[in-house]
Amino acid sequence: MLDLKQFEVWFITGSQHLYGEATLRQVDEHSQIIARHLGQTPQVPVRVIFKPVVKSPEEIYNIIQEANSTVHCIGIVAWMHTFSPAKMWIRGLQILQKPLLHLHTQYNRDIPWAEIDMDFMNLNQSAHGDREFGFMMTRMRLNRKVIVGHWQQDHVAEGLGQWARVAAARHDLKGAKFVRFGDNMREVAVTDGDKVAAEMTFGFSVNTYAVGDLVAVIDQVSDADITALVAEYTDTYQLAAGLESSGQRHQALRDAAKIELGLKYFLKDGNFKGYTNTFEDLHGMKQLPGIGSQRMMAAGYGYAGEGDWKTSAIVRALKVMASGLPGGNSFMEDYTYHFNPSNNLVLGSHMLEICPSIAKGKPSVEVHALGIGGKDDPVRLVFDAPAGPAVNVSLVDMGNRFRLLVNEVEATEVTEQLPKLPVARVLWKPQPDMQTACAAWIYAGGAHHTAFSQNLTTEHIETFAEMVGVELVVIDKNTTLRQLKNELRWSEAYYR
Ligand code: MN
């Protein structure tokens, strides 16, 4: 996965000349200490770069212009240790093109009751200095994240880390290229959408490539490379009977490895960050890619089936946000229900393409018939996902805007064997309950396809929605249908 340490956030402290040299030197020192501390906390996955304190409209404008044009700068953290009259910030904030986190902190945690004097007050003014800055951002209608707390407190590092992860994903999508092999699954509505609007909103492009172009790359794959990948399969997974080198179905495994390598070379060559394909357009391919797509996802690529480029992009974004965290992120589909009143469950899966990053234990490699696609029996990784909290995220094109929809769920152990359903599977209980969650999802127009995350939270998605300026609808333990329907109505008015 992506090493997030390649990215930096700039720590910018605002002040003014009024205070004199001595105070400003202290502001500078304190800011350096805070920036260094935050950059060293394990919760913050990116580099935190201290920038000299800004004291005038010109300095503010210049530093923001520099941040805009610095490729690896993914956002800025602003803090007003002292009072920085905010009209000085207007011109700078007007050109700001990177996400902003407003850190509302204070150098001293406690008031030094016995020693506090006017010099102390002169220096430690964020209680009002940050409000002046906050007013300006609100007055300018700028989205940002506000974090409140002493800089040594864990929740501050956690909040900054979470925001930085999201900023990295936003940055990663800017200019990202996604491949659409073939078009949308015929007649399907929710997977389609406005690719021009998506590029303007998120920064990624989706362009079509002929399956024949991919097949040409697959056909170039060498036998030696196939043998090496088959060996990797054998080392990494449990091989089903018949797939071993002397087995009757070994050729299917080699065919699948060849497809995976073709996909890998195609994506790498074109510098793509994800793709989508459709079983309705597999001309020249021997199998529908199963294990290949599963492993491309595990390597960090975005993927979704049936031409669903929106979910592919979201899967990629979540993978970037979650870089280095335990747990995984996958393309997912609400497959079928267990409407048992004492144990309501959703079974999540897909025909083949679930990412093994969410697997519990060692996946098994199996080959089985698949009625859909009309090709040879495809090879796939079969596994169960573990119990634990998760979120399902859907990106919906509402015509005049994009809506990000989140449902918090609780995954449960897969205790049954499902011997006749040889696909990867996840079981979950949606919040707040089955009836409310499913009805709310349907009212909100959520897709059957989602990105499923074990290691991100609603707050990541909320921050992301704010950074890119799209609507967010959350279904969680507090959701009631009446309230949700009102939110959807109000939202219609807001975006009209
Ligand atoms: Mn599907």
Image (cartoon, grey):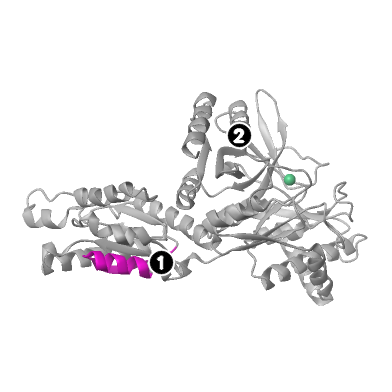
User: In which of the image's four quarters is ligand 1 placed?
Assistant: top right
Residue 423 location (% of width, % of height) = 77, 47
Q: Position of residue 307 (x, y in %)?
A: 72, 52
Q: Is residue 136 above or below residue 252?
A: above
Which residue shows up at 78% across the image and 40% down it? 418
Let me know if residue 55 is in the magenta part: yes
Instruction: Please report whichever mark, 1 or 2, sits nearer to the chain's N-terminal start.
Output: 1
Q: Position of residue 360 (x, y in %)?
A: 65, 49
Indicate the amino acid at tag 1: Asn
Characterize the local packing of mark 2: few (<14), some (14-19) or many (20 or more) Cα atoms within 10 angstroms.
Answer: many
| Magenta highlight range | 46-66
Is residue 260 visible in the rendered image? The answer is yes
Place of residue 261 in the rendered image (x, y in percent of width and height, measured from the top left): 76, 68
Q: Which mark is residue 438?
A: none
**Label 1 – label 2 distance at C-alpha:** 38 Å
Residue pointed to by mark 1: 68
Residue closest to the far right = 248
Q: Amino acid at mark 2?
A: Trp
Q: Which residue is mark 2?
A: 441
Q: Image check: 454 left or right of 61?
A: right
Tell me the SS state at disc 1. helix
439 within the magenta span: no
Which residue is found at the position 31% from the left and 69% from the top? 62
Front residue of 204/72: it is 204
Q: For the image shown, how many numbered marks are present on the structure? A: 2
Drawn side of residue 258 relative to residue 441, left or right: right
Q: Is residue 62 above or below residue 276?
A: below
Q: Is residue 253 above or below residue 450?
A: below
